[in-house]
Image: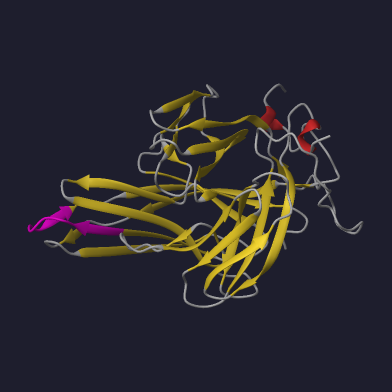
Amino acid sequence: MADPRDFLLNTDYEMDQVVLVKTGTVAAGTTEIAHGLPFTPLVFGKCASRDSFSDSTSFPYMSSSANDPVLFEVRANNAILRIINNTGGPMHYRIYGLEPANCTESVGPTRNTAQTFILNTDLNYRKLYAKGSVQLGSQQVIAHNLGYIPQVMTWYEDSNGLVRLSTTPNATVNNNVISFSGTAPAIIHYRIYYDEA
Amino acid sequence: MKPSDFKLNTDYLSVATKANTVNIFQFPSMLVFGRSSTTGTIDLDVPDGTNGVPYYMVSLDNSTFTASSYYTFTPTANVTAKLAIYRIGPNLLRASITLRNSSNSLKTISGITVYVREALLTAPDMV
């Protein structure tokens, strides 16, 4: 079985390691919290108006209306997380962070109890195929040639910080390539997995 | 040593996926009048639970996907369509399309089919 997709866990391939976990509640408006890492983390996570998270959605959370602003997003730089809550009310958040590809620093562990499973083979652990960043300005194409649609995570970074990619610029994926387009000097960070989307 | 010097490092929480689903939303034809907006939404019963971080990829042709839960496109001249995928409850996934007409004429947008691939990212503390 040479296909990485046949394995739930496969140590031939790098796996995502969470280096940042932040949870809490923010009021409407902008909140800044220190993340304590020596680099800008690749943040992802979710937000919800209910503390049960039953209405949770990943961020950036955007209004479906064509011209309305982003309702909830988290931007990171090398010192802080800026949480922008335009929903008009308090929101609960769970923020996680991964290492960027160019990271060279060590960071403290995120596991915090002996009572939780660090690995659970009831679940599938994504096998990293490629990671990196590209400078926008002209269309950037990265060939993966996997023959199927892989899972891809992307982040957009400019002078305002780093945020999960939402609509513009687009990252499009087909069976063979991933294409990024947008305006310089922004940077796209990407992680491509062997796992199928 | 940085965390990724190890392919597997149990000092750090790992991200796993569960409950991959492929969902298809089929919108009917919609009208959008001159310089106005029209919004259509469809909800699908897709169980989520509350302990995962939803991750989406969306497509209009099931062959080229956008690595995002949002997608903006132009279904016909002078009409901008904004697609948004989000959860409105633990068992309801919603697709919403907002059409904005920048011309002074009536536009008919034929039925749009949206393909959504969803995975839930999870780690021990993602409860």
B32 or B101: nearer the viewer: B101
Which residue lies at the image location 65% right of the left edge and 33% below the top edge? A101
Q: Nearer the viewer, residue A76 or A172?
A: A76
Q: On the rendered structure, is A159 left or right of A139?
A: right
Q: Quadrant of residue A107?
A: top right
Q: Position of residue A149 (x, y in %)?
A: 51, 33
Q: Find residue A197 and report its horizontal and vertical position in percent.
A: 55, 40
User: Which image quarter: residue A51?
Assistant: bottom right
Residue situated furthest left in the rendering: B105
Magenta range: B98-108
Image colouring? secondary structure
Q: Is residue B90 visible?
A: no
Residue depicted at x 61% and y 64% = A32
State whether residue B118 is above or below residue A47. Answer: above
Between A190 and B95, the residue placed more toward the observer is A190
Q: Is residue A179 left or right of residue A1?
A: left
